[in-house]
Amino acid sequence: QQPGLLQEARTLLFMPVLFAYSLCWKAVCERSIASTSQMLDPRTGGWRADVLGAFGLPKEILLPPVPSGTEIGALPGGARVIAVAGHDTQCAAAAVPSQSEDAAFLSCGTWSLLGTELPAPVLTAESCALGLSNELGANGKINYLKNIIGLWLIQESRREWRRRGKEYSFADLERLARDAKPLRCFIDPDAPEFTPPGDIPGRVREFCRRTGQYKPQSVGEIMRCIYESLALKYRFALDQLQRATGRRFGVLHILGGGTKDRLLCQMSADSTGVPVVAGPVEATALGNFIIQLAALGVLPDLAAGRGVVARSEALKRYEPADTDAWNKACETYQDIL
């Protein structure tokens, strides 16, 4: 929109490294955040000249990507500045308390990112059609994942009720959802009408009406619909990951703020049929921390850091239950997608 501005540009800095630049006045391009631009080749970690050319972007303003954990400078007092994984999801993934290949992770906040760690990218037509992405992780591996809307639906519903003079805590909403009748109606959380802020509860009711389902009325029924729809969407994403990778996942690690929501964690286990391990809640901060510790030599590598997280955090395990009812609900859910 401002071609003149691009012509004047000398260096492109992604936001995370812009903050690092303000600390030590050294410019770098950290690899994990660069990979979210879709201009990076996930096989080589270098810039894709064909993509840049297609959009008329000058390669001269792009710095060579450096790995997460690269030391880039120091503060005047001598404290060293480390380029951690600039993409917050990759910091969170660095703190997954597991090294197992049968583990998937769900970084659960306003957005939900469900993925697994791979040694190499999956670049098939099927992968593209499923909307799965290859992002470079803090340890140089691929975090192969699906973007799904997350707690935004709950957050924005709470704001809407507050605008109407009804105040509910998140604990209140969880309790009301728990008390509502199960598996009556569902939405597609990623339907476009649920992205803008506003009357999410009204849009939930309208989606259910339009798709010929029971139309939820009470706050608890609306919340139950949102919770169950998220859990079913996680199941679909996990199935897509398994199909694209050929893996069978034996555990789902939930990270971030969503770990505080016990109902969502239990429903995720019930829906997927896979045990859920919830924690750490501050996965992004812990991942950032262990990347720095590994860079400074305090830890030998990120694998050791994950071990520290596993031993230090209070992790909660949820076993699947009511799987027959959820399997039946999944058949209904497929019809509305």
Image (cartoon, rainbow, N blue to C red):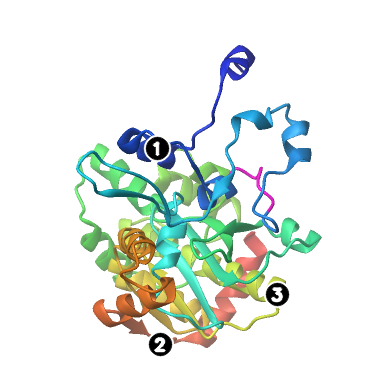
Q: How many marks?
A: 3
Please state the extent of the stretch shown in magenta in the rendering.
36-41
Ranked by sequence position, the earlier of labels 2 and 3 is 3
As shown in the figure, which amino acid type bears the numbered disc 3?
A: Arg
Closer to the camera: disc 2 or disc 1? 2
Q: Position of residue 45 (x, y in %)?
A: 64, 53
Residue 182's x, y, as percent? 42, 73
Going from N to C along the chain, the mark reached first, 1 or 3, is 1
What x and y, as percent, mark residue 286? Answer: 31, 64
Circle number at residue 319? 2
Under circle 2, the secondary element is loop
Q: Main secondary structure of the magenta part?
A: loop
Write down the quadrant of residue 329 in the picture.
bottom right
Above/below status of 176 relative to 306: above
> Which quadrant, please, contains the C terminus?
bottom right
Q: Earlier in the sequence, mark 2 or mark 1?
A: 1
Judged by depth in the image, the label closer to the viewer, 1 or 3, is 3
Toward the top, the furthest residue is 4
Residue drawn at x 75%, y 61% is 123
- Give the Cα separation between the discs numbered 2 and 3: 23 Å
Front residue of 319 and 146: 146
Q: Looking at the rendered structure, which numbered label has been put on residue 198?
A: 1
User: Amino acid type of disc 1?
Assistant: Gly
Instruction: Tell me where residue 74 sits by quadrant.
Output: top left
Q: Which residue is mark 3?
A: 243
